[in-house]
């Protein structure tokens, strides 16, 4: 039985950059959302594909409406992730 000093492990989790989240979604659309939210990326990938197929006779212009949604969702997801991460860190 040793009664030496007790060490507590520290887990370091990096935050997600909102700037990178926005840049990735601007450049890659739903694929860029995978940086900030995997589930959101999958959902918007399916929605964008469906909207593209439906608006294909118009040249796929429906994507012009889904792309901004991806950008906003990616930024909000990165901010939400950081808020939850920092709130969890303050509990300890």
Image (spheres, rainbow, N blue to C red):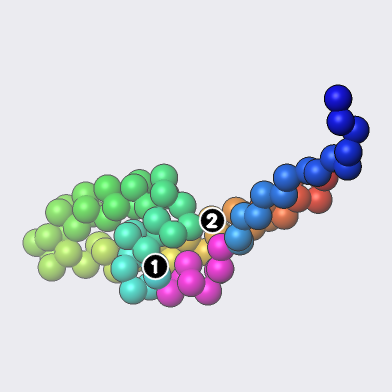
* Vertical arrangement, residue 83 with respect to residue 65, above or below: above
Q: Which residues are magenta?
A: 16-23
Q: Is residue 33 visible?
A: yes
Which quarter shows the C terminus?
top right
In the rendered image, residue 70, in percent from the top left (x then y), is placed at 40, 61
**Residue sitting at 53 percent across and 74 percent down?**
19
Circle 2 crowding by C-alpha within 10 Å: few under 14, some 14–19, many from 20: many
What secondary structure is found at the residue carrying circle 2? helix
Q: Residue furthest front?
A: 1
Q: Is residue 68 visible?
A: no
Q: Earlier in the sequence, mark 1 or mark 2?
A: 1
In the rendered image, residue 41, in percent from the top left (x then y), is placed at 37, 52
**Residue sitting at 39 percent across and 67 percent down?**
25
Q: Quickly name the residue at label 1.
A: 25
Relative to 89, is 20 on the left or the right? left
Alpha carbons under labels 1 and 2: distance apart: 12 Å
Residue 17 picture quarter: bottom right
Q: What numbered label is drawn on residue 77?
A: 2
In the rendered image, residue 44, in percent from the top left (x then y), is placed at 34, 52
Relative to 56, is 81 on the left or the right? right
> Is most of the magenta stretch helix, strand or loop?
helix
From the viewer's side, name the closer residue of 56 and 45.
Answer: 45
**Residue sitting at 78 percent across and 43 percent down?**
8
Residue 62 picture quarter: bottom left
């Amino acid at each position: 039985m040793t009664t030496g000093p007790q060490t507590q492990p520290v887990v370091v989790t990096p935050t997600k950059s909102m700037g990178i989240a926005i840049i990735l979604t601007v450049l890659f659309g739903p694929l860029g959302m995978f940086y900030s939210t995997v589930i959101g990326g999958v959902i918007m990938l399916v929605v964008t594909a469906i909207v593209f197929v439906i608006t294909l006779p118009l040249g796929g212009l429906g994507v012009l409406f889904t792309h901004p949604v991806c950008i906003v969702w990616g930024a909000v997801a990165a901010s939400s992730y950081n808020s939850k991460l920092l709130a969890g860190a303050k509990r300890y």
